[in-house]
Image (cartoon, grey):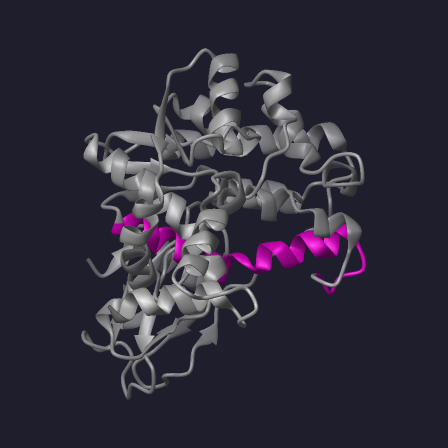
Amino acid sequence: MTLRGADRALVRDALASGDPLPGTTGFAGLVDDRLVRDVLGRVPLFVERGADDPTADDAWAFEPAALDDPELVPAGAVVGPDDPAPTTRWSLPDPDPDPDRSAALDRLREAIETAADAATSGTGDVAVAFSGGVDSALVAELLDAPLYVVGFPDSHDVEAARTAADAMGRDLTVVDLEPSDLERAVPAVARAIGRTNAMDVQIALPLYLVGERIAADGFDSLTLGQGADELFGGYEKVVHLDHRVEADTVRGAVREGIRSLPDQLPRDVLTVEAAGLEPVTPLLHDAVIDAALRLPDALLADEERRKRGLRLVATDYLPEKIAYRDKKAVQYGSLVARELDRLARQAGYKRRMDDHVTKYVESLLDE
């Protein structure tokens, strides 16, 4: 396959028009002798660093392990055979916020239903990585797919998923973890994502381990609530505007978060694929992105509530206590970060060492 995520005719039209949101959940690959990657980099694409012709068959790939010295193609870029330097074809739109709060919510509601319809067509048997938060609960309800949660015993995510599934009247499969699961999975995850830094590996491990179980149970695809925090203002930093953001407004900080997706999403996609599944991300559909970009400031985030617009729409489908529930990041909610830190220290990589967990990950790759 030389193109993933969309049909060739649609990508050709997007190239001709410059439309950054043509109605997909991302695309990448070779079209008419040019490499392309969508505006948010939802499909990973790598080229051999320094290749004379990056479009040659052996000079590009959808996964880093296939190349000797892989380099991620920038989101929104086109790479031709005669000019290896990527050129930007698509940029993230910057529409004015909709002054009509009700119209903005209607647009978002319609976009999410459009995305759910697209996610249920042609994806085979689907399961949901379910943490009990609004993002995964919303896609689980819209897709009516089986629910799986992963975590160590007594972890926040397992408890939150149980109470949410009960409130939704749904069955839940719990994938209980042991430290040996992390030891076994770390090398596979690090190789698949082409990264060894502690944060990326900690985030990828729960996805990989829940994906393994879902694949073993006979499913083809894993549905994720990825993208919601970035699109709708789900992070504390977008309200506090602390050292982690450059923007001086909530809207600007949310946009910064959206711009971080092209670096994050390859990790998640490659992790799910390494588990033998196709990732499905309804909340990253072009229609949802467009609606999110148009939300007025009052539907983003403030000191009282984050992801306001998404939560308001979610109450149409979910119990209110689930739509308004806050949750921890997956690496903390599953206790994977804690247990990986414990394993690193047991192996002699103490916290006084710089980046001790990353050093531990690298040591497992050397074995």
Residue 64 appears at what percent x and percent y? 30, 68
Residue 253 appears at what percent x and percent y? 71, 55
Residue 39 appears at what percent x and percent y? 49, 59
Look at the picture and state if 213 lies above or below 278: above
> Can residue 41 be seen at all in this image of the molecule?
no
Name the residue nearer the viewer: 172 or 44: 172
Residue 222 appears at what percent x and percent y? 33, 37
Name the residue nearer the viewer: 68 or 114: 68
Q: In which quarter of the image is the C terminus?
A: bottom left
SS assignment for the magenta stretch, majority = helix
Q: In which quarter of the image is the N terminus?
A: bottom left
Residue 247 located within the stretch drawn in magenta: yes
Q: Residue at x 80, y 55 (%)?
A: 249
Classify residue 62 by image quadrant. bottom left
Residue 86 located within the stretch drawn in magenta: no
Q: Which residue is drawn at 61% across and 33% down?
A: 107
> Can residue 74 be seen at all in this image of the molecule?
yes
Name the residue nearer the viewer: 57 or 276: 276
> What range of the chain is rendered magenta?
245-274
Classify residue 128 by image quadrant. top left
Q: How many numbered circles does the render carry?
A: 0
- Which residue reaches farthest top? 169
Classify residue 115 by image quadrant. top left
Q: Residue at x 42, y 65 (%)?
A: 348
Q: In this view, does 217 lie to the left or right of 91?
A: left
Look at the picture and state if 20 lies above or below 138: below
